[in-house]
Image (cartoon, rainbow, N blue to C red):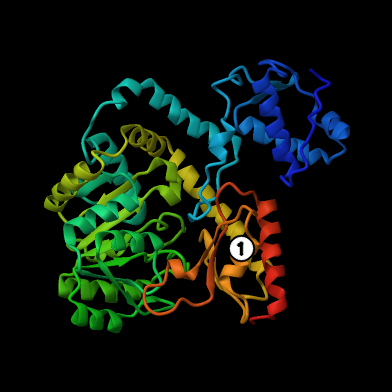
């Protein structure tokens, strides 16, 4: 069908995505059939009056989604699988939660094909994977988890490895073992918003520890231990969310010495530790007897898996964790475990991780250019920047002004433990947003802040 010319809506969406959306709609409506030949890219660009590269990008995106296929020497055709029930569901794309700090999403057709190979493996074993299974994963999946954890310099015995249904659920389970309502748990004074929600729900009192550029201050930690008799310490030491800071090796050693001396349980949230090329070793390596190390897969592979690879202080602690997980969630999803294991074994997981590492570095450069006249904290592979607003700019007003621009902005209130929150916002750089739209949004935000004066 060489005369197919889509009518593109004027809704502000990038044109290449509009072409893909209309293409999917026309396939669903039967306007285009499986096997229909699409116009050559240059011809379609000419008909639409747009740049050739825009159509090229649209065809590439459509191929990523599996709705078209190219045949060398013949052209581009609607894929045989692109029919009702097998093509991408646009409703799935609309359910993105912009309040979360997400990694950028893969667009490389070769990588996406490798990811889909994992789903083929899962479908082949689907009946087996629909059964109830171990509350902490079977041996095959634990071996894959141990292999993945070795990327962080950890080589735990399998009896200390637990596969759990996501970092958030794991923190809840661990705290239910360590704490009761009214107990104190220490954490960074600016900390992951999720731990605040969990603590509030469980009646646990969080105590914030002062930080500098290297992490929490050892003297402040010792003082808080003496004053509050805490049952645990929670830390997010690598690419800290939201400040993007990474605790130095020297500071990790100092903190581990305090943990070992005080026999204080540590919940180490290593969500971002797999992303940098050379991140410092986890504190769990220095304090294995007291550390619950959570290697979540949400940031380094994908949040939809809802899996974490957790290393407990001992085999007995693993049994305790398993009992709580069984009570709270029964088990991690066997389908997700099988997919993650396949991806680790065939190298896809590492390919995804390396893509995220490369893409975050590119996006951080875009943010640094857009916010060059503002004060902010950032790191090469962080998923966000921690932006200080100029004097006179209110975080609520800025966030309201950015509504509808498909970029996640969260005020400092969500992360602050002690005292009044400063005028900071977390600006996320990942998720489904492409580079072009992200760059536009970052410059728009910088423009909103320009009347308030330069910070540096």
- Residue 117 placement (x, y as % from top left): 47, 28
- Residue 395 placement (x, y as % from top left): 57, 71
Q: Nearer the viewer, residue 195 or 253?
A: 195
Q: Nearer the viewer, residue 275 or 403?
A: 403
Residue under the image location 83 percent in, 30 percent down = 44
Q: Is residue 54 left or right of residue 190?
A: right
Residue under the image location 11 percent in, 51 percent down = 316
- Residue 300 placement (x, y as % from top left): 44, 50
Farthest left residue?
A: 316
Tag 1, which secondary structure? helix
Residue carrying label 1: 400
Q: Is residue 154 left or right of residue 449?
A: left
Q: Quadrant location of residue 339?
A: top left
Q: Is residue 234 depicted above or below 271 in this figure?
A: below
Is residue 154 something that shows in the picture? no
Q: Quadrant location of residue 65?
A: top right
Q: Quadrant of the N terminus?
A: top right
Residue under the image location 60 percent in, 27 percent down = 66
Q: Quadrant of the C terminus?
A: bottom right
- Residue 174 placement (x, y as % from top left): 22, 56
Q: Residues within 10 Å of mark 1 (few under 14, many from 20)?
A: few
Number of callouts: 1
Residue under the image location 37 percent in, 77 percent down = 418
Q: Is residue 299 depicted above or below 259 in this figure?
A: above
């Amino acid at each position: 069908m060489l005369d197919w010319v889509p009518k593109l809506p004027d809704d502000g969406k990038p044109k290449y995505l509009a072409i893909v959306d209309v293409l999917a709609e026309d396939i669903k409506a039967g306007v285009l059939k499986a096997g229909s030949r699409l116009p050559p890219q240059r011809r379609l660009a000419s008909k639409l009056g747009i740049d050739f590269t825009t159509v090229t990008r649209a065809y590439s995106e459509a191929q990523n989604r599996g709705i078209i296929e190219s045949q060398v020497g013949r052209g581009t055709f609607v894929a045989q699988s692109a029919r009702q029930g097998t093509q991408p569901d646009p409703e799935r794309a609309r359910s993105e939660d912009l309040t979360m700090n997400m990694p950028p999403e893969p667009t490389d057709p070769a990588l996406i094909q490798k990811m889909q190979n994992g789903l083929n493996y899962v479908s082949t074993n689907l009946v087996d994977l629909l059964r109830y299974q171990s509350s902490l994963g079977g041996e095959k999946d634990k071996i894959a988890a141990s292999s993945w954890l070795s990327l962080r310099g950890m080589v735990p015995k399998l009896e200390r490895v637990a596969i759990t249904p996501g970092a958030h659920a794991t923190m809840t389970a661990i705290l239910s073992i360590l704490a009761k309502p009214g107990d104190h748990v220490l954490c960074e004074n600016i900390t992951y918003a999720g731990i605040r929600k969990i603590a509030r729900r469980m009646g646990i009192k969080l105590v914030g520890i002062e930080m500098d550029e290297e992490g929490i201050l050892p003297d402040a930690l010792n003082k808080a231990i003496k004053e509050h008799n805490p049952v645990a310490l929670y830390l997010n030491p690598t690419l800290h969310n939201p400040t993007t800071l990474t605790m130095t090796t020297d500071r990790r050693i100092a903190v581990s010495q305090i943990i070992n001396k005080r026999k204080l349980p540590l919940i180490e949230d290593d969500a971002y530790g797999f992303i940098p090329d050379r991140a410092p070793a986890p504190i769990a390596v220095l304090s294995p007897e007291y550390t619950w190390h959570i290697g979540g897969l949400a940031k380094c592979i994908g949040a939809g898996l809802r899996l974490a690879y957790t290393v407990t202080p001992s085999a007995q602690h693993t049994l305790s964790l398993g009992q709580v997980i069984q009570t709270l969630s029964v088990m991690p999803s066997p389908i997700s475990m099988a997919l993650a294991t396949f991806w680790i074994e065939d190298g896809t997981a590492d390919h995804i991780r390396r893509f995220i590492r490369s893409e975050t570095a590119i996006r951080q450069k875009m943010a640094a250019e857009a916010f060059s006249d503002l004060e902010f904290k950032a790191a090469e592979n962080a998923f966000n920047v921690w932006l200080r607003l100029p004097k006179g700019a209110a975080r609520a007003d800025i966030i309201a002004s950015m509504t509808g621009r498909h970029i996640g902005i969260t005020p400092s209130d969500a992360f602050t433990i002690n005292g009044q929150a400063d005028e900071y916002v977390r600006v996320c750089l990942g998720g489904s947003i492409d580079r072009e739209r992200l760059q536009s949004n970052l410059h728009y935000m910088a423009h909103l802040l320009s009347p308030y004066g330069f910070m540096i």
